[in-house]
Each structure stands twice: as C-alpha cells, then as structure tokens.
Image (cartoon, rainbow, N blue to C red):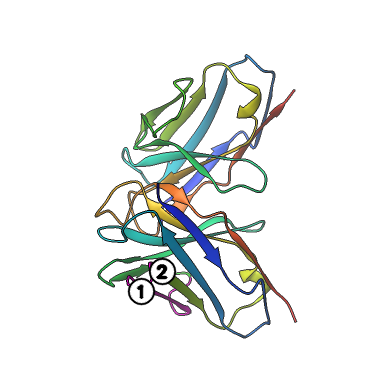
Amino acid sequence: QVHLQESGPGLVKPSETLSLTCTVSGGSMATYYWTWIRQSPGKGLEWIGYIYYSGSTNYNPSLESRVTISIDTSKNQFSLKLTSVTAADTAVYYCARPHSQWLGNDAFDIWGQGTMITVSS
Amino acid sequence: EIVLTQSPATLSLSPGERATLSCRASPSAYSYLAWYQQKPGQAPRLLIYDTSNRATGIPARFSGSGSGTDFTLTISSLEPEDFAVYYCQQRANYPLTFGPGTKVDIK
C-alpha cells in the first residue's frame, strides 16, 4: 500500500524560501502525477501543482511565479519550493497521488498526513 | 478557473438522518466532480469521484449525483463517524479547485 510522508521545517521567515519533501513508500512513482495541495483557514484547499514521474510540471497560475516542483525517482521523493513567502502562505501542506495513472487532472485518493508550515519572523 | 460553491455551510442533523449536500460549479465541471470527507487533524479522504463513483472501501450509504453545474452528495443514514467536513473538487479544468466545504455536525 502506497504511503506518503511530508517533511519540512515547520517555520519559515517572510521573504525566504519554503522547501518541502514528500517521500513515497510502498509503490513505484512511475506513471503518476505527484501533487502538492495546501490548506489554510483563509483560502481553504488549494491545488499547488504536480510533477509527472518523467519530470513535466503544471502549476497553479496563482503561484506559478514562485513555485518549483522537482522529483528524484531514485530516492522515491518529490519536492516543493515556494519562494518569497508571506503570512498568506501559512498553511498545512499535503502531498497527494491521483486516483488514476497517467492523469494529472484527477481526484486524489492517497494523501500524506500533512505538515503545518508557519510563515513568521 | 472553475469556482465551486457549497451549501449549506453547516448542516445539523442527528444520527440516522439523511444528509444532502450541494456543490455548484461555475462554469460547468461536466461530470468531473469528486467529494471528500475531512475530520480534524486528518487529510481529506476521497469518497466519490467523477460524480457518482465510490472510491475503494467507501460505504454504500454515500452516493453522488448531478452533472454540469449542480452536484449532490447524499449520505442515506448518518453514522456517528460521518460527522465531519465535506469538500467537492473539480478536475474538468486547470487549475484544479475545491469548494469551501460543508460541515455536518450533530444536532
């Protein structure tokens, strides 16, 4: 059974870069679009973007100028970088896997437990 | 961007009652709508995908219907573990978007 686990710093200072990693266990990364989603009290659930196992990406236009998602299939990990963070980026960040292979636009049936990121000096 | 609105914001019901939750899409999400359940401190759990398909392991009391701009999640008889927040999500267009949620609480 596939399991996802986020890891990251918990606290990030304003204007700095948020970096998170999602480790995938119990299955292959091949043929799936690995996705980041965040949840904040102010904006609810927000799709950040995905990376395909081959490396192609697609980002939410609202974040596109600040987001980079990368993948390391040899380590079974994918990562999120969000630059120039502000308090508005404070949220629980989830990594997730779509229900279907080969679909980037899908529902998500496997989620990590989520990691709370606070942006504060 | 497809905007999803959910109603009501809160639904107060008793165990055993029927719950009917609404999700409206603007513009159309065709049949590409999913429903999730979320409990405090947990990640969302997929219940229904593509309007009416139950995800693996989801009890038959959960059902989805609708198309285009109007969708419904029905819980036929509420169990104690069903009191939670429910979200809809569309996959018809990028960016993928979620509704603001409906909280089902105990009356």
Tell me the quarter of the picture where residue A24 sits: bottom left
Element marked by disc 2: strand
Above or below A72: residue B32: above
Magenta stretch in the rendered image: A63-78
What mark, if any, has residue B11 been given in the picture?
Answer: none
Element marked by disc 1: strand
Q: Does B18 sit left or right of A32 as displayed? A: right
Q: Residues within 10 Å of mark 2 (few under 14, many from 20)?
A: some
Above or below A98: residue A53: below
Report in which chain the residue with disc 1 lies: A
Question: Which residue is label 2 attached to?
Answer: A77
**Total residue callouts:** 2
Asked if the magenta segment contains residue A119, the reply would be no
Q: Upstream in the sequence, badge 1 or badge 2? A: 1
Amino acid carrying mark 1 in the image: Asp
Name the one closer to the observer, B61 or B2: B61
| x then y, percent, for residue A114 | 57, 58
Name the one closer to the observer, A105 or A94: A94
| x then y, percent, for residue B69 | 39, 38
Asked if the magenta segment contains residue A71, the reply would be yes
Q: Are marks 1 and 2 in contact (CB under 8 Å)?
A: yes
* Residue at the image point whose x is 67% and y is 82% from the top: A14
Amino acid carrying mark 2 in the image: Gln
Above or below A63: residue A93: above
Above or below A111: residue A89: below
* Residue at the image point whose x is 45% and y is 72% from the top: A79
Question: Which residue is label 1 attached to?
Answer: A72
